[in-house]
Image (tube, helix red, strand yellow):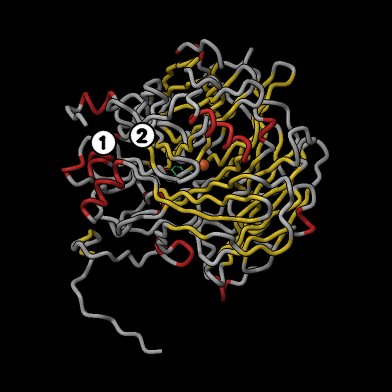
Amino acid sequence: MASRILAQQPVYVNGIKATNQSLFPNTEPFSGFNRPSRIQGDIEDLEVEGTIPKAVEGTFYRIQSDHKYAPKFESDIHFNGDGIVGAFRISDGCVDWKQRYVETDRYKVEKDARKNLFGKYRNPYTDHPTVKGLIRTAANTNVFFWRGVLLALKEDGPPFALDPDTLATIGRYDFDGQVLSPTFTAHPKVDATTGELICFGYEAGGDGNDASKEVVIYTIGPDGVKREEAWYTAPYCGLIHDCGITENYVVLAMSPLKASLDRIQKGGNHWAWDPNEDQMYGIFPRHGGKREDAIWVRSTTAFHGHVAGAYEEDGKIIFDAGVANGNVFFFFPPEDAEPGKVAHRNKIYSPVTRWIFDPKTLRSGEWVEPAQKCPFSSEFSRIDERYNGKKYSQLWTLQVDPTRPYDVARCGSPAGGLFNVLTHYNWETGELDEYFDGPCTTFQEPVFIPESDDAPEGHGYLMALMNRLDELRNDIGIFDAQKLNAGPVAIIKLPLKFKLGFHGNWVDQREIDMFKKARESGKIKPALPAQKPLPWQLSNGHSN
Ligand SMILES: C=Cc1ccc(O)c(OC)c1
Ligand SMILES: [Fe+2]
């Protein structure tokens, strides 16, 4: 086949976008499975093979990072793209799909300008001067259902709310003026017993991108009213991506990817890996927390993956999370890394690791050691969320098993990671149930769907996007959560390639309908966008 290079001005000069032309860099983060997709649209009645179980009645929401405009810097990373939300609504065995961008403040001004205006990941000093003081989050990491709205979340900024039916963006969401932190985690948790939302923000003392060590933890009641707000100071400004909740405690895991205001102001990376720094766990009371109540304990340098579950037993906190023995975010190398040298993916082992903390005796600065490790490397663990904050025994996760065949000739590199084995693990019995689809398929983060409201723990279904790396196309597999090994009970055939997304959640149709009715009838006030700028925007002299 003849290929023709059209004559044109170079789009990137010295690594910086030099024209207004829409053309993405020819780099790994924008290639293969992660090539920009940018599709907003609808498909009714997707093809289904097999039989979708009766209990699967609801919507699977998921989000991916998908730069609307070619980035300012040719070296831009996957994490810096606009959030685009997909919804797979399943009803009586039929599946409809819809996908829309999250219309953040960033998205809107860039759309008006028809080009990129925000520069590097979490570095406002690299932005076009006209966007100074605007909220720069791309809301691309998680999509979370709360009281009838979808919250599109990224840890560098506030939530943006979407309508769960239409996926239309409502606007920035501040919980009716109750949550004014500049940052908000992508991983809030709903306590399965109380229905409370526990959420936090880190790097929260200023505009969210200034290496602040302040951390805030909020509790919102199931009635939408804020019950707790407590501020703490971390030992350093490190990345705190996920949390665990128990009946009486919140645990935050902080990795030694550190922010430096000086480096940010010089236009450098927000984060740099510090191989000489410890991993930390912050332990905080759920109720009436005061600054001096924080307990920060440390252990060997490590990178935290996601939290599986947490609970209390005999007064101790059990906390289970992925812990990797190296910097998973190779694109944020140590500050003294050789300049100009391309950062490479590190070889990493990342078992789900169990910690047992005694909050009555632990003191800040103490050293802790893991209690137990799962016998495999994995990421994206999920549990039966009816057990959030309670004793649980089962998790589902994406195992990385490099000993299985992988067809590199047909698939190239498995962008994002070789998540090739869907895995079910039981802490009590040690039982391992695995599903490997073949040498051309990897998985995205699964969601668990209970068989019924009163089904025993883990009885139900597991749903996950499957990446057909050789075809650049996706399917969705639905599995009996107790029999992954038997293969999918249904496959939703997708005519498109999605990008490698981050997170998603299953929402039962009854919950969506209940809140919709309550909002329409006025029983619950409508979800309104934030009415005032965030405090940091006002102090920067910005008002909008
Ligand atoms: C997976 C973790 C993670 C951490 C920080 C981010 O900004 C992010 O964006 C997609 C993802
Ligand atoms: Fe995450």
- Give the label on residue 262, or none: 1
Image region (quadrant) for ligand 1: top left
- Left or right: 544, with 503 as reference point: left
Where residue 128 appears, x then y in whole percent?
A: 19, 47
* 10 Å crowding of disc 1: few (<14), some (14-19), many (20+): few
Quick check: can you spot residue 349? no
**Callout 1 amino acid:** Asp
Where residue 538 appears, x then y in whole percent?
A: 22, 25
Quick check: can you spot residue 363? yes
Q: Quadrant of the C terminus?
A: top left
Q: Toward which corner of the image does residue 487 lie, by quadrant? A: bottom right
Residue plotted at (49% across, 29% down): 519
Label 1 beta carbon less than 8 Å to ligand 1: no
Where residue 405 appears, x then y in whole percent?
A: 67, 68
- Give the label on residue 172, or none: 2
Q: Residue furthest front?
A: 521
Foreground: disc 2 or disc 1: 2
